[in-house]
Amino acid sequence: MLFESLLPNFVGPLVLACLATPTCRGESLASVLKRVDDEDFAARVNGDRAAGPGTTLDIKEIVIGRCWDYQRVIGMKEGKPLSEVDCNGTAWPAFVNAFAYKSPCSTPEDAFSNFIKIMTVSLPVNGTLFWSGTKNLALMYSELSGGTMFSLELTFFGYTVNGLTWCGKHTGGIHGINYDSCPSFGDQSCQSPVSTVFWGSASMSFARQARGSISVLLDGSDPRGAFRNNSFFATMELPNLDTAMVDLVNIIVVHDLDGHIVDTCDNGTILILKDRIIQRGLQWKCKDDPKLAKLIQCTENPDNEKCNLTSGVNTLHGRSWNFIVLTLLASLWMIWTC
Ligand SMILES: *[C@@H]1O[C@H](CO)[C@@H](O)[C@H](O)[C@H]1NC(C)=O
Ligand SMILES: *[C@@H]1O[C@H](CO)[C@@H](O)[C@H](O)[C@H]1NC(C)=O
Ligand SMILES: *[C@@H]1O[C@H](CO)[C@@H](O)[C@H](O)[C@H]1NC(C)=O
Ligand SMILES: *[C@@H]1O[C@H](CO)[C@@H](O)[C@H](O)[C@H]1NC(C)=O
Ligand SMILES: *[C@@H]1O[C@H](CO)[C@@H](O)[C@H](O)[C@H]1NC(C)=O
């Protein structure tokens, strides 16, 4: 009697929350990951592989150094562990034991759970930033926010390993690490590549932690659409938001400076995203090309005509400065030639 009346109330919401999460439907992480668009994934998994085809050289020093850097130097108020994490004695072993002396293609789903748990910090409410096709912009956004907005790459675990390549080797590696080659991206024979499993679990854990309103930066000039249902965001992050803790999704649609417009807040695939958000019981807001985004784009492209910061007044100043500099140069030239 008691159970009968309690069950629907308790189990209902739980089951619904669970159905929305792919891994909860009994599907393996590896098979969910297979649905993610390769290009989207590659932007996360590999920096640009400039360091070579195998594990990034000196990875141990880099990981341990970044881990201390994050705790000691970066100086953010938020997003730090409550008590210090020992980078050498705790963080590095948790990371390397997930893959050293192991095949890089049969990584268990929970391989990195210990590392991720050790490196999890509490992020500010309203402070989670997701992105799709806009990695650089999102990184700049979160860096410029002064510790109020975090993209995955700026969280403790993301920061520590971002842009690195790593994989293990059963035998013949150095301390079980393969510095010569790691499975290439999109290698179909590689069942569950080690870095893919890492970024998949890291993103899921990041999304589950989000609180309050979250933001997502999308590329409204991407010919495939700003919101793609096989994107990393759609597959790994949106379904893992805890709807009891998140209430609003701020959609930010950014267009390239050349003015290619595929989707805006009012049309195209953004409408599909709005539907998905509503289906998850959340609210949305949407903004096209906010000023901060434009400013960041302009730092990468200062000569673009849309980045003309010159107003009438500044033009005058500009001219007078030019004039002073030219006069000075002319005087110097005259002194030298005399
Ligand atoms: C780093 O950790 C290893 C294993 O825990 C230990 O042997 C070594 O002394 C530590 N090094 C430093 C500099 O703390
Ligand atoms: C989070 O954002 C909402 C509006 O979306 C605001 O009402 C709330 O005060 C914010 N919370 C914090 C802790 O900043
Ligand atoms: C994903 O999008 C494609 C094309 O836009 C559509 O055909 C397909 O049904 C969608 N899949 C899901 C699961 O929504
Ligand atoms: C959306 O609207 C913009 C203009 O506001 C237009 O350039 C673009 O082609 C539209 N996209 C779609 C998918 O209809
Ligand atoms: C920048 O704007 C000013 C004033 O609006 C204009 O005079 C100037 O020609 C512009 N420069 C470029 C490179 O577009």
Image (tube, rainbow, N blue to C red):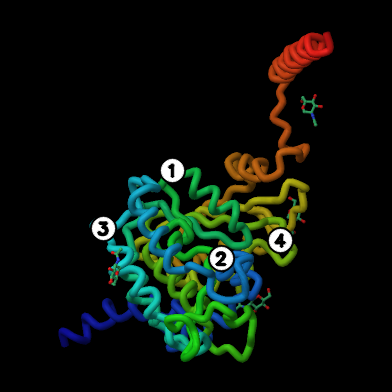
Three-letter amino acid code at the position of disc 4: Asp
- The answer to whether the residue labelled 2 contacts the one labelled 1, judged by CB atoms less than 8 Å apart, is no
Query: Dividing the image into 4 quarters, which one contains the C terminus?
Result: top right
* Residue underneath mark 4: 222
The tag earlier along the polypeptide, 1 or 4, is 1
Q: Could you tell which of marks 2 and 1 lies nearer the N-terminus?
A: 1
Closer mark to the observer between disc 2 and disc 4: 4
Q: Is residue 23 above or below residue 205?
A: below
Kindly check if marks 2 and 3 are in contact, taking CB atoms under 8 A apart as contact: no
Identified by mark 3, the residue type is Glu
Which numbered mark, 2 or 1, is in the foreground of this view? Answer: 1
Disc 3 Cβ-to-ligand 1 distance below 8 Å: no
Q: Position of residue 47 (x, y in %)?
A: 59, 65
Between residue 30 and residue 3, name the one nearer to us: 30
- Element type where label 4 sits in the image: loop
Q: Quadrant of residue 113?
A: bottom left
- The residue carrying mark 2 is 275
Is residue 72 visible to the viewer in this orientation of the structure?
Answer: yes
